[in-house]
Amino acid sequence: MQDKFLSRLFWLTLAAALLLLLSRYLPLLESVFPVAIEGKPVDSVGKLLARLDDFKIGEVVSLSILRDGHKMGMEIGLQAGS
């Protein structure tokens, strides 16, 4: 019984922490949308991840983004996630 309570408490605490993080950083993410990697269109998170899988850590790729309604290009170096 106590294990079940502790498990629920853990998951509720984790959910609360994630909500706090999202509420803090989501406004920064809302205004930037990736639209292409190396000229290939990206219109979903799945396609973004699939395109990134085509490259190796350390490679530099061309990224087109839409920020505040303006299309911008940039070069980014790929790093391993933590």
Image (spheres, helix red, strand yellow):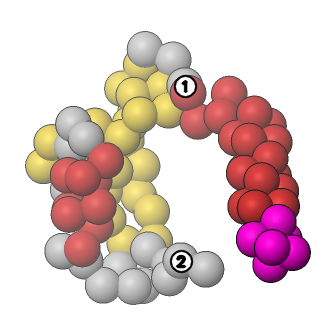
Residue 39 shown in magenta: no
> For the view shown, which residue lies furthest in the front direction?
1
Q: Say above or below: 23 vs 13.
A: above
Question: Residue 8, located in which quarter of the rendered image?
Answer: bottom right
Residue 31 numbered mark, or none:
1
Using a 10 Å C-alpha cutoff, classify the residue at mark 2 as few (fewer than 14 neighbours), some (14 to 19) or many (20 or more).
few
Residue labelled with disc 2: 81
Q: Which of 5 and 55 is in front in this view?
A: 5
Q: Which of the 4 image quarters holds residue 20?
A: top right
**Whether label 2 touches label 1, CB < 8 Å:** no
Q: In this view, does 59 lie above or below 10?
A: below
**Magenta stretch, main secondary structure class:** helix
Q: Which residue is drawn at 77% across and 53% down?
A: 12
Residue 61 image-quadrant placement: bottom left
Residue 48 vertical position relative to residue 22 in the rendered view, above or below: below
Residue 33 placement (x, y as % from top left): 41, 34
Q: In which quarter of the image is the N terminus?
A: bottom right
